[in-house]
Image (tube, rainbow, N blue to C red):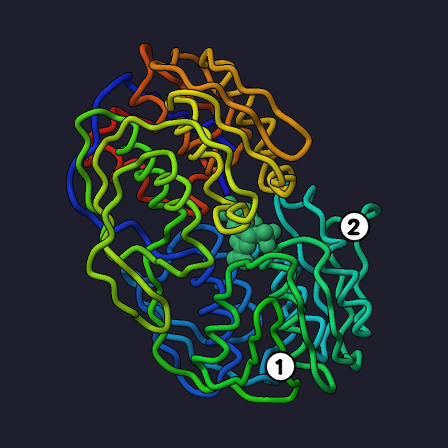
C-alpha cells in the first residue's frame, strides 16, 4: 500500500454514458483463492479482482506454499494442496487494508497444525477482531490479540477444534464465514445462525467445490473433515464497484449507462432496491447464472431521486454501498433517514462520521446518529475539499458527487481505491466524469 497523499480532482458537472464491465467481485475473489487453495486439484479462476485486498489473500496463500499462477488479466490458476497441505508461513501474513482477508483467514488458520500471525495496515489494526476471536475460542482455538481485540492476531496451531452452534451477535458475513471455515477442521457439526441475511458466497462456493453445506433460512451447517474438489470458478463483476456508477448515472442529468454482467446475488442487491425506492431508473436485463452466482446487465438513466426512510432489513444487503447511497440522498428531493447501520462505524473508516463530515463540507445538511444518518437533499452540491480517511469507498463516492457540484471537489488520501477498484479513474473518465489524479 502506498502512503502518498494521492488526490482526486473532480471537475463539476457532466454526465455518465457508455457500456462497460466493472472488475471482479472482491468478496468472491478472496474466497476463490482460499477455497481453491484448500481443494484437491487445479482451480481456474476467471474475472479475479486484481485489487490490493484480494492480492493480499493471494500472497498469503503463496506464502503458505500454494502454487498460484497469475493473475493474468483476471485469470488465476490455483494448484490446490488439499485441506491439510498448507505449509507454515515463514513470516507474519500482511493483509494490508483487508478485513475480509483477516477475519476469514483467522478461522481457516485456527484449524491448521502450525502457528501463524496476521497483520494489517493502520486501519485494519484498529478494526474489531473480538467478533471472530470469541467464537473461535469457543471452538477450542487459541488466538492472542492486542488489548481490545485488535490485530496483530497470533494464532496457535495444533489445537483440536470442536464444532459449535453459533448465533451471530451482528449481521456479518465475515464472522459467519470465519466460523464455517474453522468448522471445516472441527470435530462434528458447525452451525451459524445470522440475525439478518448476509452475503452467502462462502456457502455457495463450498457447495460448488463439492462440500456439503446445509442452508435453512438464517442457519448454515456443515460437518468437519470433508474435502473440496478444485474446478472452474467464475467471479462476477462487483456490484459494490458498480454502485458508484449506479449512483453517478442516477444523479447526473442526461446520463445513460450500461454495466455488464454485474453480480446479482440477492444478498448483495440492496443498493438497487434502495435506489429504485428513491425513484432511480435501473433496468435489469440478460439475467443468467455464471459459476453459481446470478449476473445481469444494468441499464441506468438519470432520474429525479426522492429521499426515503431506508428499510432496516435492506441494511446488510447494501452494507458497503452506503457511502455512495449517501451521495444519492444528498442529491434527492427531501429527507433520507438511515437507521440500524452501526456496522458502518467499524469499516475501513467510520463511514457514518466521515461521510457526514464530507457532505457537510459540500454544504449538505447531514446529521450522524449512533446507528445511521439523516440527510436533507438539495438541488446542487457545493465544491470543496474532502478527507477520505484512506477509505476507498468514501473516495469513490465523493468523486461521483462532483457530477452534481457547482464547483470542483478535491479528495485527499485516495491511494486505497486500489484495494477494491484499481481501474476506477480510467473507467470513470471513459464514462465522462471529470476526474484526474
Ligand atoms: O464477507 C465479505 O466478503 C464481506 C462482508 C462485509 O463485512 P462484514 O461481515 O463485517 O459485514 C463487507 O462489508 C465486506 O466488504 C466484505
Ligand atoms: C468493508 C470492506 O472491506 P473489508 O471489510 O474486507 O476491509 C469494503 O470493501 O467496503
**Residue 68, placed above or below residue 52:** below
Spot occupied by residue 436 in the image (x, y as percentages of width and height): 29, 26
Of labels 2 and 1, the one closer to you: 1
Q: Residue at x 81, y 67 (%)?
A: 137
Going by the image, does 340 lie left or right of 229?
right
* Residue under numbered circle 2: 149
Sequence-wise, which precedes: disc 2 or disc 1? 2
Q: Residue furthest right?
A: 147
* Secondary structure beneath label 1: strand
Quadrant of the image for the C terminus?
A: top left
| Alpha carbon separation for disc pair 2 and 1 | 27 Å
Within-10-Å neighbours for mark 2: few <14, some 14–19, many 20+: many
Q: Quadrant of residue 112?
A: bottom right
Q: Depth check: 350 or 144 in front? A: 350
* Residue under numbered circle 1: 222
Spot occupied by residue 210 in the image (x, y as percentages of width and height): 47, 86
Amino acid at each position: 500500500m502506498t502512503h502518498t497523499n494521492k488526490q482526486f480532482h473532480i471537475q463539476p458537472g457532466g454526465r455518465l454514458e457508455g457500456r462497460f464491465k466493472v472488475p471482479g467481485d472482491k468478496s468472491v475473489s478472496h474466497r476463490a483463492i482460499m477455497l481453491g487453495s484448500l481443494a484437491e486439484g487445479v482451480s481456474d479462476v476467471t474475472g479475479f479482482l486484481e485489487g490490493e485486498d484480494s492480492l493480499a489473500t493471494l500472497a498469503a496463500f503463496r506464502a503458505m506454499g500454494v502454487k498460484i499462477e497469475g493473475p493474468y488479466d483476471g485469470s488465476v490458476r490455483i494448484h490446490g494442496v488439499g485441506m491439510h497441505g498448507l505449509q507454515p508461513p515463514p513470516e507474519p501474513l500482511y493483509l494490508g487494508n483487508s478485513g475480509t482477508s483477516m477475519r476469514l483467514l483467522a478461522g481457516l488458520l485456527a484449524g491448521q497444525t502450525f502457528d501463524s500471525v496476521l497483520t494489517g495496515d493502520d486501519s485494519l489494526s484498529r478494526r474489531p477482531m473480538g467478533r471472530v476471536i470469541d467464537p473461535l475460542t469457543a471452538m477450542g482455538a487459541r488466538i492472542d490479540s492486542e488489548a481490545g481485540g485488535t490485530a496483530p492476531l497470533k494464532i496457535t496451531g495444533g489445537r483440536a477444534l470442536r464444532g459449535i452452534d453459533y448465533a451471530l451477535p451482528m449481521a456479518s458475513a465475515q464472522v459467519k464465514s470465519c466460523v464455517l471455515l474453522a468448522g471445516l477442521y472441527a470435530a462434528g457439526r458447525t452451525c451459524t445462525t445470522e440475525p439478518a441475511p448476509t452475503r452467502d458466497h462462502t456457502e455457495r462456493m463450498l457447495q460448488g467445490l463439492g462440500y456439503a453445506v446445509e442452508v435453512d433460512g438464517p442457519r448454515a451447517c456443515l460437518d468437519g473433515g470433508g474435502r473440496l474438489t478444485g474446478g472452474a470458478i467464475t467471479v462476477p463483476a462487483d456490484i459494490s464497484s458498480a454502485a458508484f456508477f449506479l449512483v453517478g448515472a442516477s444523479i447526473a442529468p442526461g446520463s445513460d449507462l450500461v454495466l455488464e454482467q454485474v453480480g446479482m446475488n440477492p444478498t448483495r442487491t440492496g443498493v438497487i432496491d434502495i435506489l429504485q425506492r428513491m425513484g432511480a431508473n435501473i433496468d435489469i436485463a440478460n439475467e443468467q447464472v455464471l459459476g453459481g452466482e446470478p449476473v445481469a446487465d444494468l441499464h441506468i438513466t438519470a432520474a429525479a431521486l426522492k429521499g426515503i426512510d431506508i428499510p432496516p432489513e435492506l441494511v446488510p444487503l447494501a452494507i458497503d454501498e452506503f457511502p455512495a447511497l449517501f451521495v444519492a440522498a444528498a442529491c434527492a428531493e427531501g429527507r433520507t433517514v438511515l437507521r440500524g447501520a452501526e456496522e458502518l462505524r467499524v469499516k475501513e473508516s467510520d463511514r457514518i462520521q466521515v461521510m457526514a463530515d464530507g457532505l457537510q463540507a459540500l454544504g449538505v445538511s447531514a446529521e450522524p446518529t449512533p446507528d445511521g444518518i439523516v440527510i436533507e437533499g438539495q438541488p446542487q452540491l457545493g465544491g470543496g475539499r474532502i478527507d477520505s480517511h484512506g477509505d476507498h469507498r468514501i473516495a469513490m463516492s465523493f468523486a461521483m458527487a462532483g457530477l452534481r457540484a457547482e464547483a470542483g471537489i478535491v479528495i485527499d488520501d485516495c491511494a486505497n481505491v486500489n484495494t477494491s477498484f484499481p481501474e476506477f479513474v480510467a473507467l470513470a473518465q471513459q464514462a465522462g466524469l471529470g476526474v484526474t489524479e
